[in-house]
Image: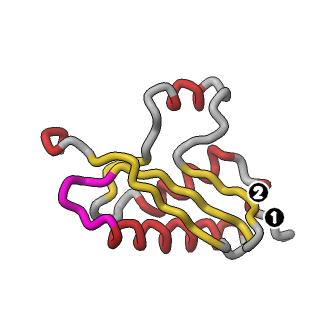
Amino acid sequence: MKDRPPSSLSAEVVTSAVWDAIAQIPGVADLYRKPLQSLGERVHLERHGPVRLTDDADGPLLEVHIVLEPGASVSGVGEAVARAGAGYLAQAAGTSIGHVEVYVDDVADAASE
């Protein structure tokens, strides 16, 4: 089987794969989406979702935007998300991820737990 570079993976596949890898990490409430982003993704107008895989000078760059659970450690969850997302994508794409950036864009409402 021929290795495919990560940039050949669709945005939907990358987002789904990363979500599968990080969904069970304690402290991760959800992927972050701007209010109109979900609609834009459904009609294929939004190209920059909560997970992005792009080419960078240091190799493939994985960017993940998350919603944190209240009281969770930002650095601990961020490191776990980076490791899990990069590891899962590297295995799926057959190419190591050069750099991972994790952004905590929001904290879930404590009442929604």
Tell me the chief SS of the magenta region: loop
Residue at point 35%, 61% (across, down): 24
Q: Is residue 71 magenta?
A: yes
Instruction: Locate the C terminus and report the quarter of the image it occupies.
Output: top left
In front: 37, or 9? 37
> What is the crowding at mark 1: few (fewer than 14 residues within 10 Å), some, or many (at least 20)?
few
Quarter of the image holding residue 79?
bottom left
Q: Which numbered marker is on residue 7?
A: 2
User: Which residue carries the number 1 mark?
Assistant: 4
Give the residue drawn at x 33%, y 72%: 76
Residue plotted at (66% across, 66% down): 92
Point out the frontmost of discs 1 and 2.
2
- Magenta residues (range): 68-74
Identified by mark 1, the residue type is: Arg
Q: Identify the residue at image location x=35%, y=70%.
A: 75
70 in relation to 112, above or below: below
Quadrant that contains the N terminus: bottom right
Local SS, label 1: loop
Question: Whole-percent x and y of residue 100?
Answer: 57, 67
Q: Where residue 73 sits in the image (x, y, percent)?
A: 26, 67
Q: Position of residue 63 (x, y in %)?
A: 57, 57
Q: In the picture, residue 91 is in which quadrant?
A: bottom right
Instruction: Kindly report the distance in space between the C-alpha atoms of the residues bearing marks 1 and 2.
Output: 8 Å
The disc placed on residue 102 is none
Asked whether, in this view, residue 18 is left or right of residue 93, the answer is: left
- Residue 68 drawn at (x, y percent): 31, 54
Mark 2, secondary structure of its residue? helix
Q: Amino acid at mark 2?
A: Ser
Q: Image height check: is 34 above or below 25?
A: above
Q: Is residue 61 left or right of residue 18?
A: right
* Colour setup of the view: secondary structure
